[in-house]
Amino acid sequence: MKNFRFATKVLMGAVVACALSVSLTSCSDDDDSEDELPIQNNDNNGNVVVSSNITTNTTWTKDKVYELGARVVVENGATLTIEPGTVIKGQSGTGASARALIIARGGKIMAEGTASEPIIFTTKRDDITSGQISSPNLTAEQNGQWGGLIILGRAPISASANEVQIEGIPTSDPNGLYGGNDPADNSGVLKYVSIRHGGADIGQGNEINGLTLGGVGSGTVIENIEVVGNQDDGVEWFGGTVNVTNVIVWNAGDDAIDTDQAWSGTLDNFVVITPAGHCFELDGPEGSMSGSHTIKNGTVVASRNGRVSEDLINTDANSEVSLENIHITSIVSGQTINRTVDNPNVSFTDITLDILSGTNIDDYVADGPAPAGITAGTTGKANISAFSNWSWTAVAGETNGL
């Protein structure tokens, strides 16, 4: 987990500057100074540019492309509905100008794509249109082109207080608060959603996750999610109780799956392919509250085409997590599972590693012999068919043979 609070003064200064620079000029795809784009309704491509917070119930339809021209918040009491097949594109920008869509506490997102019409979040530089799955002009390695999707709720978190500010939003903005006392809090629905080319750097090497879930409650439905080419983590949980089903993360620039602040939900059925950081970064509670989560039924590709993950599973001394029915393949020398012996709150059940010839399972555990739940094996554990047709990862053939 990264700390972004240092950016508060910069972010507030940028907000003032943007307010003073509103004009009637229009933007172009070839404009390299997108950080200073004015607030407007349409760009030269006919995209609907959204540069203000959403304060009333709003629907985005698939016959238009919506372009994030700022950090856009769905505020308390408002619901943003996104039709199946809709494409949302973030303008480029770093630091205070990083574009993102944020669902504040009390706000809702109803993004219910389908297997035939997924909802796609991507960069303005992507030429993709509704009905396409693969980008016609970008590769899955290109990242940091915009921010990401952030959902904030009122479910319990483990932190110094029962509510704190999420990474990347200035502390003066109450829309950035997450956490509370409602485990069943409902932030809406995400189904068949692909998030691509995000993770903009907001300063000093700190980036936004593809999907950030801060204090999101179990009343929220999240299933069939893809994150491709994000500069930071694929999906990161900060506490909360939400359950997530069918997730695929391809080419994350840092960790694929990152958990913090006593998230107490379940991730069920997932595929991770070649993150640059940890395949799993599973941190324990930060305060006095405890909370264990479950990660199960997954297949992980630890290296491919020159991309090598930093390690396989990384936990800390007070992590609380149950890992079940997970297969890790394409392992290279030096990749290990860390910190298993000294923490009884981390459990392994039916974890199989496709080990290298001439090695044994103990060689892949950094701090002692492999626990009984970690063995050698060659068979994938995820239901790969869950990602067919609608995900770029599967369409590109990256799930073949898993």
Image (cartoon, rainbow, N blue to C red):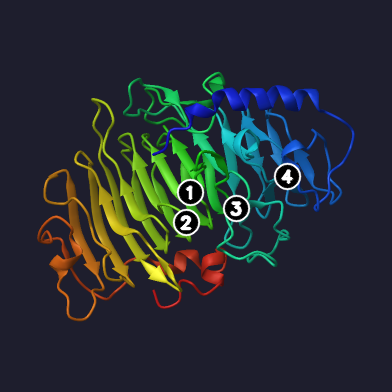
Residue drawn at x 19%, y 55% as measured from the top left: 348
**For the residue marked with disc 2, what is the amino acid?**
Ala
- Front tag of 1 and 3: 1
Q: Which residue is mark 4?
A: 67
- Front tag of 3 and 4: 4
Q: Is residue 316 visible?
A: yes
Q: Position of residue 33 (x, y in %)?
A: 76, 43
Q: Nearer the viewer, residue 159 or 295?
A: 159
Does dot 1 land on a helix, a strand or a loop? loop
Q: Residues within 10 Å of mark 2 (few under 14, many from 20)?
A: many
Q: Position of residue 297 (x, y in %)?
A: 32, 60
Q: Is residue 384 left or right of residue 146?
A: left
User: Gap in Å between the C-alphas at discs 1 and 4?
Assistant: 21 Å
User: Gap in Å between the C-alphas at discs 1 and 2?
Assistant: 6 Å
- Front tag of 2 and 3: 2
**For the residue marked with disc 3, what is the amino acid?**
Gly
Q: Earlier in the sequence, mark 2 or mark 4?
A: 4
Does dot 3 land on a helix, a strand or a loop? loop
Relative to 250, residue 99 above or below: above
Q: Position of residue 319 (x, y in %)?
A: 23, 41
Q: Earlier in the sequence, mark 3 or mark 4?
A: 4
Figure quadrant of the N terminus: top left
- Front tag of 2 and 4: 2
Residue drawn at x 41%, y 52% as measured from the top left: 245
Figure quadrant of the C terminus: bottom left
Q: Is residue 55 visible?
A: no
User: Gap in Å between the C-alphas at discs 3 and 4?
Assistant: 18 Å
Residue drawn at x 31%, y 67% as measured from the top left: 381
Q: Which residue is mark 2?
A: 252
Q: Which residue is mark 3?
A: 113
Which residue of the protein is positioned furthest toward the bottom in this rendering?
Answer: 357
